[in-house]
């Protein structure tokens, strides 16, 4: 009887310990803007190691992901490349109003895989190239920032015939990486660990700041992993990873 009692107490203690340490791991489906691919993969790995929960990641342009969410896609979190679509999701009743926050501020870069090719705005003004890649501005915030930059430089009309559009920023990167375009506008984060080529970090004065917002979707309410992931995203470990990939950090609400 005494042994049985001790075993029962030990079992209760183990269960209590496991429950307190998130032993009952859950998962959450996260819609992620393509520019944040590499950073969020590293964040998700750190999140799983720390909590046991798993973030299941799906990538696309912010516009594509927004459309999927409005069509009842099973996402519980959206990490957008802008702040407008998370705001719209809240207004649409598809996201939790008080959950929205800026997790990163993106930086736009003009990049070529060719060394010494890009020499600031002078390269654009010279126009000595056949193809200039940028993401679809109606779906991808980085594409919209690229168009805004060209208009600020009064070059959009001149260069428009040379523009090739990717569906998202990841496809735009591929156009340049494979040589289908000599140069193009990408996210600075995509060039982390990419020493080849030449680049120009576009001055912030030429485009509206790319405030990238996260929001908890209504499908994620009550999901432990979803709540924990957003909390982790605000924490020092995730912020360190975000900065490592070239993003600015704000952390404030809009």
Image (tube, rainbow, N blue to C red):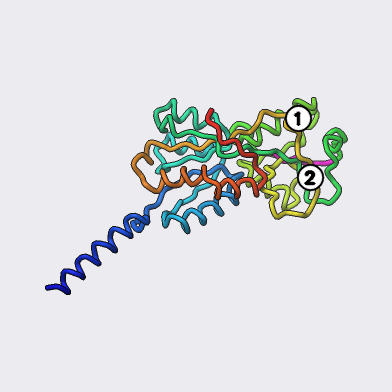
Q: In front: 82, or 126?
A: 82
Q: In front: 62, or 11?
A: 11
Estimate how packed mark 2 is, as few (under 14), some (14 to 19) or many (20 or more) residues with alpha carbons within 10 Å: many
Q: Name the residue carrying label 1.
A: 150
Q: Report the span colored magenta.
A: 129-134
**Marker disc for residue 130:** none
Q: Quadrant of the N terminus?
A: bottom left
Circle nearer the viewer, 2 or 1: 2
Percent coordinates x, y for residue 2 in the rendering: 14, 73
Q: CA distance from mark 2 to mark 1?
A: 16 Å
Does residue 1 appear to the left or right of 156 in the view shown?
left
Q: Name the residue carrying label 2.
A: 199
Mark 2 and 1 residues: CB-CB less than 8 Å, in contact? no
Helix, strand or loop at mark 1:
helix
Q: Quadrant of the C terminus?
A: top right
Which residue appears at 72% of the width and 32% of the height? 204
Which residue appears at 43% of the width and 34% of the height? 70
Percent coordinates x, y for residue 88 in the rendering: 48, 28
Q: Is residue 224 magenta?
A: no
Percent coordinates x, y for residue 107 in the rendering: 68, 38
Helix, strand or loop at mark 2:
strand
| Extreme residue in the front direction | 2
Q: Earlier in the sequence, mark 2 or mark 1?
A: 1
Q: Quadrant of residue 93?
A: top left
């Amino acid at each position: 009887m005494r042994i049985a009692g001790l075993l029962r107490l030990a079992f209760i203690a183990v269960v209590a310990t496991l429950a307190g340490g998130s032993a009952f791991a859950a998962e959450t489906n996260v819609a992620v803007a393509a520019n944040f691919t590499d950073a969020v993969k590293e964040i998700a790995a750190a999140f799983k190691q720390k909590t046991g929960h798993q973030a299941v990641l799906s990538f696309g342009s912010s516009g594509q992901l927004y459309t999927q969410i409005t069509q009842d896609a099973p996402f519980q979190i959206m990490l957008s490349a802008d702040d407008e679509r998370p705001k719209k999701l809240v207004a649409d009743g598809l996201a939790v109003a008080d959950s929205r926050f800026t997790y990163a501020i993106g930086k736009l870069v003009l990049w070529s895989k060719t060394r010494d090719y890009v020499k600031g705005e002078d390269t654009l003004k010279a126009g000595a190239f056949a193809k200039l890649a940028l993401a679809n501005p109606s779906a991808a915030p980085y594409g919209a920032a690229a168009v805004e930059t060209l208009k600020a430089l009064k070059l959009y009309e001149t260069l428009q015939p040379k523009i090739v559009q990717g569906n998202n920023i990841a496809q735009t990167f591929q156009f340049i990486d494979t040589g289908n375009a000599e140069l193009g506008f990408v996210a600075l984060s995509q060039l982390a660990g990419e020493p080849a080529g030449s680049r120009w970090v576009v001055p912030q004065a030429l485009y509206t700041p790319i405030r990238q917002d996260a929001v908890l979707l209504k499908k994620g309410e009550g999901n432990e992993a979803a709540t924990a992931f957003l909390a982790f995203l605000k924490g020092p470990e995730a912020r360190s990873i975000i900065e490592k990939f070239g993003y600015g950090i704000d952390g404030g609400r809009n």
